Image (cartoon, rainbow, N blue to C red):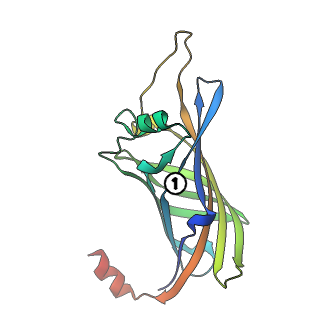
Amino acid sequence: MSLTKWSLDPAHSEITFKVKHLMISTVTGSFKKFNLEAATQTDDFNTAKKIEFTADINSIDTNNEQRDAHLKSADFFNVEKFPELKFSGTKYEVNGDEGKLQGDLTIAGITKPITLNVEFGGIVVDPYGQIKSGFTVTGKISRKEFGLTWSAVTEAGNVVAGDEIKINAEIQLVKVVKEVVKEEEELAEQA
C-alpha cells in the first residue's frame, strides 16, 4: 500500500487548553513540546491511516510557575510516572472541510475514547516548495475521567478548578515523502 507521510511543523502549530478557575474566569494553558505524525494513502486526509499525537507534560505552560508545578505533580498529571500524554486516531470522517476525528486519549495512564472536531484549512505549497496542510482541532474532555480528580473548594463554596477542559489545536503538517510499503513488510514490523 502506498503511504504519504506527514510530520508536524512546530513553528506553525500550537496546542492550548482552557479550564474554569473558581467558576468565574478561564485559565489558558499550552504544551510547548509536542509531536504529531500522520500517514495517508494520498494527499487527501480522508484516507488517513495513522494519526499519532504526543505532548511532553513537562512542557506545560499556564503562565504561572507555581500552577505549572502543581499540574505536573501527583495531584494532576504525575509527570514523574507519566511524562507524556498520547492520542491515537482510530477513525477520521470528513464532510467537506469539517470532520470528526475519533481516537484514544491517554493521560496519566488512563485511556479513553474521545471525538474531536476538525476543520481542514487546505493544502498549499509554501515559498520553499514544501507541501503543507492545516487543521484546527477542537474538543472537550472531563479531566476527572482521566484520573485528574484533585479538587478544592473555597470558603464561599466555589470550585477552584473546573472539570471540563476545552482543547484547541492549530496544526500545520509538512508532507515528508511518499513511499511504497509492502503489506508483508508491515506485517513483519507488527510481529
Residue drawn at point x = 30 percent, y = 79 percent: 189
| Type of the residue with mark 1 | Lys
| Residue 74 screen position, x and y as percent | 34, 35
Tell me residue 186's x, y (percent). Answer: 36, 81
For the point 55% across and 12% down, the residue is 157
Residue 145, placed above or below residue 169: above
In the displayed orientation, state which residue is furthest to the front: 65
165 left or right of 52 in image: right
Residue lying at 48% horizontally and 63% vertically, measured from the top left: 35
Q: Give the answer, above or below, for where 105 lies relative to 28.
A: below
Vertical order, 161 against 45 (above or below)? above
> Front-most of 145 and 8?
8
In the rendering, at what x and y percent does residue 14 appear?
60, 56
Residue occupying the far left of the picture: 191
* Whether residue 151 is situated above or below residue 190 in the rendered picture: above
Percent from the top left, x then y, of residue 146?
A: 42, 40
Occupied quadrant, residue 96: bottom right
State the residue position of label 1: 32
Quarter of the image that includes the C terminus: bottom left
Q: Nearer the viewer, residue 122 or 115?
A: 122
Give whichever of 162, 188 is nearer the camera: 162
Find residue 72 and report its image quarter: top left
